[in-house]
Image: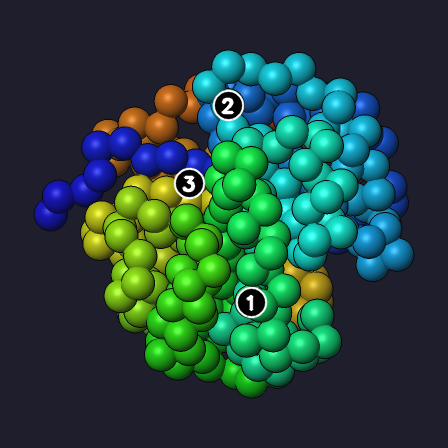
């Protein structure tokens, strides 16, 4: 079986990982996390989200965080922009990439952003056009690509439909996201195959939550398909708001440990990555939610 020789990881910890934290994390701590991640060799970091502070108070300091980062050559800094208002605020901070998101579930779309899938994508049309006019890369995420907390299982045809609509408005790359972590390898493979009907294999990535402990298995099946780009979150930051007590994004440390053990290059220094995850976990007063980090930190202590 031929696996990719190199994998690119987007660390979404500073944005997706921290956005559900109840206690406000100061901008200085978020900036330090970004600096530690880039020092560990991450070249793609999802930094923050330009959303209404009323809905996501944790991201109210988006402009301050972006302004405070010491940018490193060769690193791409991305931000989430849900609408034109968000994009107009985001563009002042000079992101390299913006992220828009659409659900593969009608019920999730209605409950999350109060509109249908098709309406949500039309909202992103001017955002994608404005970004591309300013030479800012446009990445899209398809949330609930295999399962939804309201609808249950999601048919691959829905993923194909959303991929087609996103392609139609000029989104250059899509992430297939198992938002609630219910996916298993066969289901994830079908969702990926659906996305690949409309996007080249070099323009598709996997975004897996580890709610049921399936994220690494789902990553492995995608590696077997030749998918070489993945989102992950340092220290496994980020809960799942729809599954009480569940873990959120797969930990970057666990994905890197898997890849390095398979002889796949990432450009990431695992020890420095573990230090970055420990830094933010210490601030949050809890242990890193990463099996690899826990094992290696115990080894260090021993």
Q: Quadrant of residue 117?
A: bottom right
Say whether residue 148 is left or right of residue 47: left
The disc, 3 or 2, on the residue closer to the chain's N-terminal end is 2
Q: In front of the other: label 3 or label 1?
A: 1
Q: Which mark is residue 121?
A: 1
The disc, 3 or 1, on the residue closer to the chain's N-terminal end is 1
Q: Residue at x 63, y 64 (%)?
A: 123
Q: Nearer the viewer, residue 100 or 286?
A: 100
Read off the residue under disc 3: 255
Could you classify mark 1 by the number of other residues whose Cα lies within 10 Å: few (under 14), some (14-19), or many (20 or more)?
many
Say which element carries label 2.
loop
Q: Nearer the viewer, residue 288 or 94?
A: 94
Q: Residue at x 64, y 47 (%)?
A: 80
Inter-mark Cα distance, 3 to 2: 20 Å
Say which element carries label 3.
helix
Q: Residue at x 61, y 17 (%)?
A: 71
Q: Position of residue 149 (x, y in %)?
A: 60, 77
Q: In front of the other: label 2 or label 1?
A: 1
The disc, 2 or 1, on the residue closer to the chain's N-terminal end is 2
Q: Position of residue 23 (x, y in %)?
A: 87, 45
Inter-mark Cα distance, 3 to 1: 31 Å
Could you classify mark 2 by the number of other residues whose Cα lies within 10 Å: few (under 14), some (14-19), or many (20 or more)?
some
Read off the residue under disc 2: 75
Say whether residue 121 is left or right of residue 52: left
| Observer able to see residue 19 | no
């Amino acid at each position: 079986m031929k696996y990719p020789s190199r994998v690119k990881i987007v660390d979404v910890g500073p944005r997706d990982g921290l956005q559900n934290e109840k206690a406000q994390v100061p901008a200085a701590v978020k900036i330090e996390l970004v600096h530690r991640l880039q020092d560990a060799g991450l070249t793609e970091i999802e930094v923050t989200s330009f959303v209404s502070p009323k809905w996501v108070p944790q991201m109210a300091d988006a402009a301050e965080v972006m302004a405070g980062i010491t940018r490193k050559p060769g690193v791409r800094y991305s931000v989430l922009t849900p609408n034109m208002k968000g994009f107009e605020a985001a563009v002042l901070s000079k992101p390299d990439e913006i992220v828009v998101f659409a659900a593969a579930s009608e019920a999730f779309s209605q409950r999350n952003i109060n509109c249908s899938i098709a309406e949500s994508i039309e909202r992103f049309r001017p955002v994608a056009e404005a970004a591309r006019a300013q030479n800012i890369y446009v990445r899209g995420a398809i949330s609930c690509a295999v399962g939804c907390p309201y609808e249950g299982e999601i048919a691959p045809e829905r993923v194909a439909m959303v991929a087609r609509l996103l392609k139609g408005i000029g989104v250059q790359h899509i992430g297939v996201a198992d938002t609630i972590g219910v996916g298993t390898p066969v289901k994830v493979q079908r969702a990926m195959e659906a996305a690949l009907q409309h996007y080249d294999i070099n323009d598709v990535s996997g975004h897996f939550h580890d709610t049921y402990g399936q994220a690494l298995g789902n990553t492995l099946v995608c590696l077997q398909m030749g998918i070489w780009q993945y989102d992950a979150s340092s220290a496994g930051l980020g809960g799942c708001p729809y599954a009480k007590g569940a873990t959120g994004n797969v930990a970057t440390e666990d994905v890197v440990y898997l890849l390095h053990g398979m002889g796949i290059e990432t450009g990431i220094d695992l020890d420095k990555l573990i230090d970055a995850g420990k830094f933010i976990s210490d601030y949050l007063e809890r242990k890193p939610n990463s099996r690899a980090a826990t094992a290696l930190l115990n080894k260090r202590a021993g």
